[in-house]
Image (tube, helix red, strand yellow):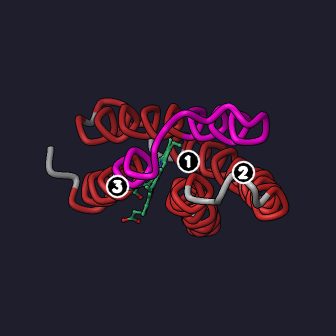
Amino acid sequence: MLWIKSFHIIFVVAWFAGLFYLPRLFVYHTEVKAADTEGYQRFCTMERRLMVMTTIGMIGTWVFGLWLLSQFPGYMKAGWLHAKLTLVLALSGYHGWLKTRVRAFAEQRNTRSAKFYRIMNELPALGLLAVVILVVVKPF
Ligand code: HEM
């Protein structure tokens, strides 16, 4: 069980590295000058590669998280678990949205501003804060 939990946490860290850094890359990508095609393409490559690592992190988090859950059938009735899973679903949706943005930049059809990505960049931090408190403190 402790092995499963260790790998669950390792994949969570890999997932969040991407959730934190991808929107930050979008901020810098938005600010690249129109004439700098080489700079623009370099960001596309970084985003595509980071997206792959982030997706591996998300899949591993779900696989090891659900495996861990199968070891604690009593948790299925716990309020904190329901709240945690709701937030994790929202974070998975955010992940899907990041993927659509990577594609939009690759196809040169991003219309959002750097300020917009700066604001979106704060959401995963709030998710992380809430999920870790829910799973460790188990307040309800
Ligand atoms: C993908 C769906 C997920 C499922 C089904 C899941 C399920 C679980 C379960 C059953 C435990 C064991 C709790 C215990 O031993 O008391 C656990 C531990 C943990 N989970 Fe998740 N989890 C998921 C996603 C996440 C995410 C996204 C995060 C971080 C943002 C996270 C962070 C943690 C941490 C830090 C622990 C260790 C808590 C402790 O040992 O006190 N989990 N998870």
Please identify the quarter of the rendering in which residue 5 is found.
Answer: bottom right
x, y percentage for residue 112?
A: 49, 37
Foreground of the two, 33 or 116 = 33
Q: Which residue is mark 2?
A: 51
Nearest-to-viewer mark from 3 and 1: 3
Q: Is mark 1 within 8 Å of ligand 1?
A: yes
Q: Residue at x 73, y 35 (%)?
A: 103
User: Is residue 75 shown to the viewer in this render?
Assistant: yes
Mark 3 to mark 2 CA distance (whole Å): 18 Å
Front residue (pair 90, 118): 118
Q: Where does the N terminus fall, quadrant-wise?
A: bottom right
Q: Which residues are magenta?
A: 95-119
Q: Residue at x 51, y 31 (%)?
A: 93
Q: Main secondary structure of the magenta part?
A: helix
Toward the left, the furthest residue is: 139
Q: CA distance from mark 3 to mark 1?
A: 24 Å
Is residue 34 placed above or below 111 in the rendered structure?
below
User: Mark 3 — residue?
Assistant: 122
Is tag 3's residue or tag 1's residue first in the polypeptide sequence?
A: 1
Q: Amino acid at mark 1?
A: Gly
The answer to whether residue 10 is magenta is: no
Alpha carbons under labels 1 and 2: distance apart? 21 Å
Would you name the residue on which mark 1 appears? Answer: 65
- Which residue type carries mark 2? Met
| Numbered disc 1: secondary structure | helix
Q: Position of residue 125 (x, y in %)?
A: 35, 58
Residue 127 in picture, x, y percent from top left: 34, 50
First reached walking from the N terminus: tag 3 or tag 2? 2
Q: Nearer the viewer, residue 13 or 34?
A: 34
> Where does the C terminus fall, quadrant-wise?
top left
